Amino acid sequence: MIEAKNVHYSYPSKIEALRGISLTIRDGEFVAIMGQNGAGKSTFVKHFNGLLKPSRGTVKVDGVETGKSSVAALARNVGFVFQNPDHQLFSESVEEEIGFALKNFGFEAKVIEDRITWALDLLSLSQYRKTSPFLLSGGERKRVALASVLAWDPKTLVLDEPTIGQDYEQKEKLRQFIMQLQTQGKTVVVVTHDVEFVAECNPRVVLMKDGKIVADGQGQQILTDPAMLELASIVLPQIAQVFAKLSVLGLPKNIIDIQEAKTVLLRAKEKRGQ
Amino acid sequence: MSVFDGLKFRRVNSLIHNLDPRIKFVYVIGVFIATLLFLQIIPLLALFVLQLPFVFLARVQRQWLRSLRGAAFLASFIFLINIATNFFVGGYTLTPEVVESAAAMTLRFVVLVESFSVFFLTTSPDHLGLALEQSRVPYEFAFAFTTAVRFVPVLAEEAQTIMDAQKARGLELEKGNLLKRIRNYIPVLIPLIVSAIRRSLELAEAMESRAWGACKRRTNLYRLCLHRGDYVLLGITVAILAGAIYTYFFVSIPTIVNLL
């Protein structure tokens, strides 16, 4: 469980990035943190593994106050995948890259070997085991970065902009992957701009603006509220846009899922036929 | 990253900021040469103190202090290495002279950092490029140089992100003995270098697609010309150099140990 209480944070340059954020993320939840650039999303999630410590207020992860713990200790439970994989890849092979964190956390050699195989398999990277990560494509590098964090099986996973630079197929795989983590009871926090991706996943959505939380609720409810989205400079997902335009037909507006849209439209058609 | 902060230009309207960058550079080189002439602590101290008025006139004391603080680690390293080599080579005795010469070597480094820091703190990258161009440095080289200077803060920020990313994977930079600590930085340095190279290739492509170097003779909107202050600084530089050379050849410099 992650509990943030009245968190304020100012960068050394005196820019106040967070102005009093309180948020509780329960175990096993899937949360998308959204908002425009500079809203403080990344700054906020960096508090979860202690990369940043609150200037005021507290952040507790499973009851441990992050201000009083080292990043290495917190990172064991909170895996953080950065936006740009090139900011972390440095090893000669994918295998070593994935083993890096495991060695840092002091796993035994045998366990490291098993975990590497497991993580490679999980993200379909097995054929690149001995390849240099620098020779892989952008999408593959992103997967290596993800694998290198998943390898130590953290309880909570924070993904910063995971869909940037990914084609649709990769995004879909990522979505299924997050769902799979959900069934294992993992907590997943995603920082993203990608409305369509969030609409497809329909997680709990936390909207941020100017270092504050302006909305918190189920994706379907938040992503179909034009006033709220405008406040955070986000556009409606395409499906919601269509239903907003179809308001003359008297259809519900809070629809972001393709299946649901299909059902609603078919039902409307039947009604007209009668 | 405080070292970089101490070299980052800040726009302040001061006497020093408005000086011609070429003359400022001549001054820095003058101080540089004067510094390298001496191995004794007294003239180096004099050179250190001589530059303080510039720092205060430019109103960059705080940033300047930060650059010195950033250099403190390397300075103490230089001091220790000097003591150690003298100690082991010189027959396992630690005399006051040894300490003094080590201190002088360290001070030499500090003076160099001091002068370069003042120069970079008070000279905008644009001015620097202009100065190079008008000193007949080929445009390609001038551009490469200003770009390098301009990318220092970008790289510093990137280094911070990379450190965060590796810390998030359990890397502890401050752990272990000196050798281990240096090795700890490998996971930070490799991504930094790789991304710098990648960035430079991207920059080159972006520039070429905007017709960089299409016309051979470039003109500038602004032209640098020398004012009274510049001649004064030139005079000061000549005086420092002349004084340093005179002292070097004709004055026997006492050590502090001798004076006491």
Image: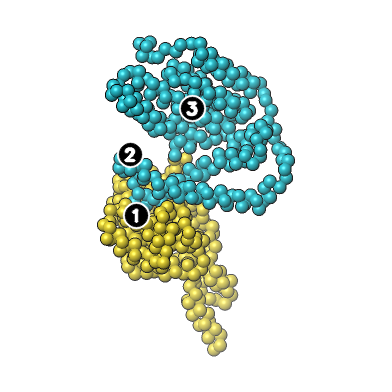
Chain colours: A yellow, B cyan
Residue underneath mark 1: A101
Task: Label 3: state its secondary structure.
Answer: helix
Q: Secondary structure at mark 1?
A: helix
Q: Nearer the viewer's eye, disc 2 or disc 1? A: 2
Query: For the residues tagged 2 and 1, is the chain the same?
Result: no
- Residue at the (37%, 31%) spot, across then down: B77
Counting residues from the start of the chain, the first of labels 3 and 2 encountered is 3
Is residue B14 or residue A85 the one in the foreground? A85
Q: Amino acid at mark 2?
A: Leu
Callout 1 amino acid: Ala
Q: Name the foreground residue: B54 vs A192.
A: B54
The answer to whether the residue labelled 3 contacts the one labelled 1, judged by CB atoms less than 8 Å apart, is no
* B20 in relation to A11, above or below: above
Q: Position of residue A185 (x, y in %)?
A: 32, 66
Q: Which residue is mark 2?
A: B178
Q: Is residue B106 left or right of residue A228?
A: left
Count neighbours of disc 2 (C-alpha within 10 A) and say few if under 14, some if 14 to 19, many if 20 or more: few
Q: Quadrant of residue A122?
A: bottom left
Q: Mark 3 to mark 1: distance in Å?
A: 40 Å
Residue A144, horizontal then vertical, whole percent: 42, 60
Give the position of the C terminus of chain A as an image quadrant: bottom right
Residue B10 lies in quadrant: top right
- Chain hosting mark 1: A
Mark 1, Cα crowd under 10 Å, few <14 / some 14-19 / many 20+, is many
Q: Residue at x 34, y 57 (%)?
A: A99
Asked whether, in this view, residue A266 is left or right of residue A147, the answer is right
Structural crowding at the residue carrying mark 3, measured as other residues with C-alpha within 10 Å and reported as few (<14), some (14–19) or many (≥20): some
Look at the numbered discs 3 and 2 and tell me whether their residues touch, using CB distance below 8 Å.
no
Chain letter, disc 3 residue: B
Residue A136, compared with residue B150, is above or below; it is below
